[in-house]
Amino acid sequence: MSISRPNARATRPRAIANWLLLVAAMVFLMVVVGGITRLTESGLSMVTWKPISGTIPPLTHAQWMAEFDAYRTTPEYLKINRGMTLAAFQGIFFWEYLHRLIGRMIGLVFALPLLWFWWRRAIPRGYGPRLAALLALGGLQGTIGWWMVASGLVDRPDVSHLRLATHLSAALFIFSGLIWTARDLRLMTRNAGVPPARLHTGSLIALLVVAVQIVIGALVAGLDAGYAFNSWPLMGDTLFPAGGWRQPWGFAANLIDNPIVVQFVHRWFAWIAAGAAVSLALRASRTGAGWALPLTIGLVAAQIALGIATLLTGVAIPIAAAHQAVAALLLATLVACAHRVGAYPVRYDAHAARRSTVTA
């Protein structure tokens, strides 16, 4: 008895959009857990990468000791955590294991429904390659994650801050792609003939400015630059501390590798990013999206307040984790704003814009 695929193409854009938003929510969760993993210095607790067998955690005392013995050969243990107890090791192992487990779950939640939708011929024309690309990027992200971890297992007791920034950037790029594609498919449910939204130059610039701020934030985390100065708006007693610019380092080296400079740039570039975010939301609001401006302003205000609180509390983990979480939520909102601008151009008259949206 042979099994054949359905002949008729009955696309299901709404179902696929809802599924993509679910995956995006899981990516958001993974970003938050990844932030906690970094803040708790847990990322180097698992010294091997076993995509399949690594799904099962240590279950016996002997298995835990084998994991602990492997960790005790790493530079982080030898230079920083020498004398750590098994119980303390289990605490940091939990966050890295959870981070990897969520990644595996995302892979399954994305790949299996994608296969089902493909088998049922439910994917709208033109979206198959885009979904396949998102799946491939997810697989690449796992490789980037291990590439990041491997940087802290040889000579240095922590991961490369540049690889950490790459890992976070890739996650948020996938996150944004999921949201954009889901919104394209939502448009299709209202009008089967509508083309995908265009990413306008102004929207792209605003998103890139915010993305740069997020990448600088990743450098802050990777360099532990948040601990450099725990005061605001001054760094100690001055706007920029004397001797903070390292000589004879070049401009690029200070900008990327100097914790004091990285913290300074992150503090003040935030206002440029805030302006870019609000300007994009304003453009979206002119298409009739009444949610765009108040939601963006609220998230920007919360993000700035959390950033300041992170400094003043000496990088308290709950506040710092919330800071990263709100950054991801703000990015999601701005992607929705950019999509709105690309789908409902401002040149439409106000009545047409109001009729076309309601709750998009």
Image: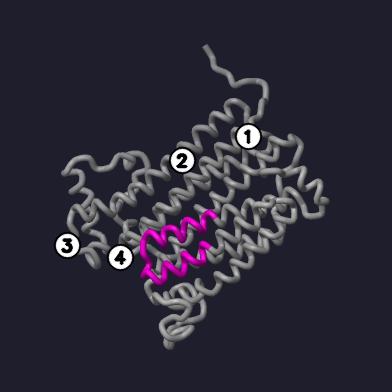
CA gap between label 3 and label 2 equals 37 Å
Of badges 1 and 3, nearer the viewer stands 1
Q: Are marks 4 and 2 in contact (CB under 8 Å)?
A: no
Residue at 59 percent of width and 25 percent of height: 120
- Residue located farthest toward the top when viewing the structure as drawn: 1
Q: Earlier in the sequence, mark 1 or mark 3?
A: 1
Q: Are marks 4 and 3 in contact (CB under 8 Å)?
A: no
* Cα separation between marks 2 and 1: 21 Å
The residue where tag 4 is placed is 157
Q: Position of residue 68 (x, y in %)?
A: 21, 52
Task: Tell me: 222 left or right of 202.
Answer: left
The residue that disc 1 covers is 14
Q: Specify the amino acid type for callout 2.
A: Gly
Whole-angstrom CA distance, mark 4 to mark 2, is 30 Å
Task: Please provide the residue range marked out in magenta.
Answer: 302-329
Camera-side residue: 43 or 132? 43
Q: Nearer the viewer, mark 1 or mark 4?
A: 1
Please identify the dominant SS of the magenta region: helix
CA neighbours of label 1 inside 10 A, class few (<14), some (14 to 19), many (20+): some
Q: Position of residue 97 (x, y in %)?
A: 33, 47
Up the image or down, 101 lies above or below 208; here it is above
Q: Position of residue 277 (x, y in %)?
A: 62, 62
Image point 40% across, 69% down: which residue? 223
Q: Is residue 56 left or right of residue 327?
A: left
| Quadrant position of residue 81 | bottom left
**Residue that badge 3 annotates:** 83
